[in-house]
Image: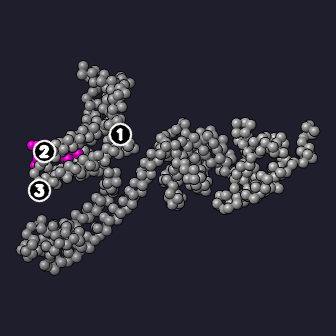
Amino acid sequence: MIEKYILKFAYFLERSDRYYNVKHFVYQFLEDPHSKKKKYFDFFMIFLVLSTIGILIYEVNHPPLPALNDYEIIAVGVFILEWLGRFWVISHSHKQIIKDYEKSQLINQPFELKKSIKKIIKIKLNFIFSPMSIIDLMAILPSYRPLRILRILMLFRIFKLLRYANSIKQFSDVFIEKKFEFFTLSIMFMMAIAFGSTIIFLYEGSGVNDHIHSFFDAVYWAVITISTVGFGDISPVTIQGRIATIFLVIGGLSVIAFFTSIVTTALGEKIIALKEEKIIGEANSLKNFIIICGYGQMGKALAKEFLSIKQAFIVIDYNNDMLVHATEQQILSIKGDATDPDFLSNVGINKGASSIIALTNDDAVNLSIVLTARALNQNINIIARANDTNIEDKLSLAGANHVIAANDIASLIATEYIGQPIAFNAIDDILLDNEGAVMTEVDIVENSPYIGKKLDIIDFENYNFTLIGIIQSTKNNSFKFNPHKDQYIIQPKDIFIVIGYEEVIAKFKVDLLTKHASKKDFITKEPDNEK
């Protein structure tokens, strides 16, 4: 009967949106590293921990104040609620029951509730006896009146800061990740202590040295000596003791050097990890940003353009040298594999990213980036570079919205440069901020003699500038890029977008008003069927 009600309650929780919403809300405060709620909660808890420790220090030389006692009770209440909240969100107990029940039904075996409860208890016990949970409990324990003698355990609240300051937590993780190295170091340390303390006790512990009365005194001397602290309160008086001291000091220097090497290496790795987490956090806070994968020549040019228009973006590359250049340009960049789904998810492809651009020199990598990005986000805009024209169709099939054929673009630019070198010199001047070269508008006024004529009547080569396109006032100011000169008819209020040097463009504007096109030119340029 009890089993039936527990199953019913488990399914009730599984169907309850309110239950999941409340649990997710609590999870955001306590465990979600990407939640702003957790950030504010961490600041609040840091203040609470430090203030309660301040009360402990204040009460050393001052009588306890009722207001401070009330404040401590409230703080401890918050600590208790925090611990209970973590105990709750650490797992979904009802899911374990449902899973075991449905599995038993599938294989036609009787459902054993006890096994499910054992699994749930095991998970909860693992949490209870975890280091941070023990610290939380020891910080709560001395608040109870019958146990005021344990008030010194309030100092364990300092270790609660490990939960709320990520950089401190990263530092503590150094000792966990390098546990083998530290274990080896500890063995070396203990062997040196055992050797030194035994030698000094054997030769100076039988009344020879007035300061060594027990083996503990010998151990104390060995620890002080091997750590190179050397208080001087215990000094060897025999030749054997002094020889032991020499070896102990040399061994101590080796242990310290080993320890320093381990910590320095580990901290260097952690600093990199902290920087990456900071960058990921900044990326997750962005809205409508663009992900650039690959910081080669195309990536650099694109990043420069985004900076000029203040478009939010982040650069991903696996080359450290490239990232150093990006950092020098104050560009948000991170080292990573853009084909890794977890990495792209952390960067924010499912959050604030609006587009992702694959610009690496390897088509296989670009294809993999497109596949991964499309699998993670069906709506994101994907632009991919194709170094080989044969891969363009594959990129499109993989999910790319736009494909850039890099080699084709280079060929077109080279071809256009042969025909219009003056225009390309002007473009270079504009990009380099040199004076004289401009991109500007030329209005076709209503009384211009060129209205109604074909565009090829204008000798652009003679003016040494390039027509980029025309804004057509008769078609709701639509823009026509690179119009066909033998087909387009010039209309009133058209606006030419041209690029070139100021002097020739100024001359052209004057000619539009003062020169009259030759009728002969018009006739010779008309097709035969229009004569």
Residue 49 position, x and y percent, is 24, 49
Q: How is the image coloured?
A: one colour
Sequence-first disc among 3 and 1: 1
**Which residue carries the number 2 mark?**
66
Classify residue 294 as left or right of residue 440.
left
The extreme bottom residue here reads 239
**Which residue carries the number 1 mark?**
28
Residue sitting at x 85%, y 47%:
457
What is the C-alpha distance between the residues marked 3 and 1?
40 Å
Vertically, is 477 above or below 332?
above
Please name which of the two marks, 1 or 2, marks the residue nearer to the observer. 2
Classify residue 287 as left or right of residue 151.
right
- Mark 2 surroundings within 10 Å by alpha-carbon count, few (fewer than 14), some (14 through 19), many (20 or more): few
Residue sitting at x 30%, y 64%:
259
Label 3 element class: loop
Sequence-first disc among 1 and 2: 1
User: In the image, is residue 19 part of the stretch drawn in magenta?
Assistant: no
Circle on res. 61 = 3
Label 1 element class: helix
Residue 210 visible in the displayed image: yes
Query: Closest to the observer: 97 or 386?
Result: 386
Name the quadrant of the N terminus.
top left
Classify residue 53 as left or right of residue 531.
left
Q: Main secondary structure of the magenta part?
A: helix
The quadrant in which residue 260 appears is bottom left
The amino acid sitting under disc 1 is: Gln
- Mark 1 surroundings within 10 Å by alpha-carbon count, few (fewer than 14), some (14 through 19), many (20 or more): some
The amino acid sitting under disc 2 is: Pro
Query: Closest to the observer: 267 or 491?
Result: 491
- Mark 3 surroundings within 10 Å by alpha-carbon count, few (fewer than 14), some (14 through 19), many (20 or more): few
Residue 149 position, x and y percent, is 10, 49
Start-end of magenta stretch: 136-150
